[in-house]
């Protein structure tokens, strides 16, 4: 596939697959719908200190409709390897790709890590070691060193991602393969 005169050699699109994310998002949405129907439609105040009907309508639109659409419909992590580097986009939070050019990548490695212990969970995260993570689920990824900055890219296929990076990024160091039990 070509994009802007560049060939895409690898693409991985990840969506949230943890049941607890679905339960939390849908639980919040259901609570908003119950509150709206109970107070606005049936006229029974919702809660011990109910808000106005307008406030409940706004919360319904935000948390009963928009929040589930964004979290369950749009949320995804897209990783691509193109001719010049690795492109990462965490939709809907990134409006454009984060680009890590091969010429700037000093090293990379496929590894298993503990997202909660190392980064406090999944998403776009930073830790006290000044590492940055882009992850949506799982415990596998590729750690790249870009000009001294450590970037963890979560992946369900880290070995394949490293293989494609190795074949495209001839300026990169040979990747190390190890597991980190932090």
Image (cartoon, grey):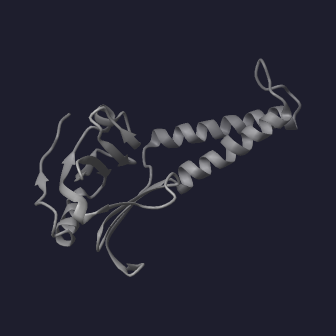
Residue 15 in picture, x, y percent from top left: 44, 54
Question: Is residue 86 positioned above or below 47 on the image?
Answer: below
Question: Front-most of 5 and 79?
Answer: 5
Question: Is residue 179 positioned above or below 164 on the image?
Answer: above
Question: Is residue 154 positioned above or below 80 on the image?
Answer: above
Residue 9 in picture, x, y percent from top left: 29, 74
Residue at (49%, 55%) from the top-left corner? Answer: 94
Q: Is residue 109 visible?
A: yes
Question: Front-most of 10 and 21?
Answer: 10
Q: Locate residue 147 relative to residue 20 in the image: left or right.
A: left
Residue at (80%, 24%) from the top-left corner? Answer: 50
Question: Front-most of 97 and 153?
Answer: 97
Residue at (54%, 51%) from the top-left corner? Answer: 72
Q: Give the farthest residue toward the top.
A: 48
Residue 138 in picture, x, y percent from top left: 32, 46
The quadrant holding residue 31 is: top right
Q: Quadrant of the C terminus?
A: top left
Q: Locate residue 154 relative to residue 164 in the image: left or right.
A: right
Question: Front-most of 7 and 23?
Answer: 7
Q: Locate residue 68 relative to residue 41 in the image: left or right.
A: left
Q: Is residue 122 visible?
A: no
Residue 124 in picture, x, y percent from top left: 41, 44
Q: Quadrant of the N terminus?
A: bottom left
Residue at (43%, 61%) from the top-left corner? Answer: 97
């Amino acid at each position: 596939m070509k994009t802007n005169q560049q060939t895409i050699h690898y693409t991985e699109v990840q969506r949230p697959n943890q049941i607890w994310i679905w339960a939390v998002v849908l639980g919040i949405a259901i609570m908003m719908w119950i509150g709206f129907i109970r107070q606005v439609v049936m006229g029974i105040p919702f809660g011990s200190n109910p808000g106005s009907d307008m406030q409940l309508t706004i919360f319904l639109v935000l948390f009963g409709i928009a929040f589930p659409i964004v979290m369950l419909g749009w949320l995804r992590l897209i990783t691509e390897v193109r001719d010049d580097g690795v492109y990462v986009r965490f939709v809907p939070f990134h409006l454009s790709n984060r680009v890590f050019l091969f010429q700037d990548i000093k090293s990379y490695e496929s590894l298993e890590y503990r997202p909660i212990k190392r980064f406090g969970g999944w998403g776009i995260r930073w830790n006290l070691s000044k590492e940055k993570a882009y992850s949506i689920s799982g415990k596998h990824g590729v750690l790249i060193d870009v000009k001294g900055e450590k970037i963890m890219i979560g992946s369900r296929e880290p070995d394949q991602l490293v293989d494609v990076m190795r074949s495209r990024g001839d300026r990169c160091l040979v990747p190390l393969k190890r597991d980190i039990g932090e």
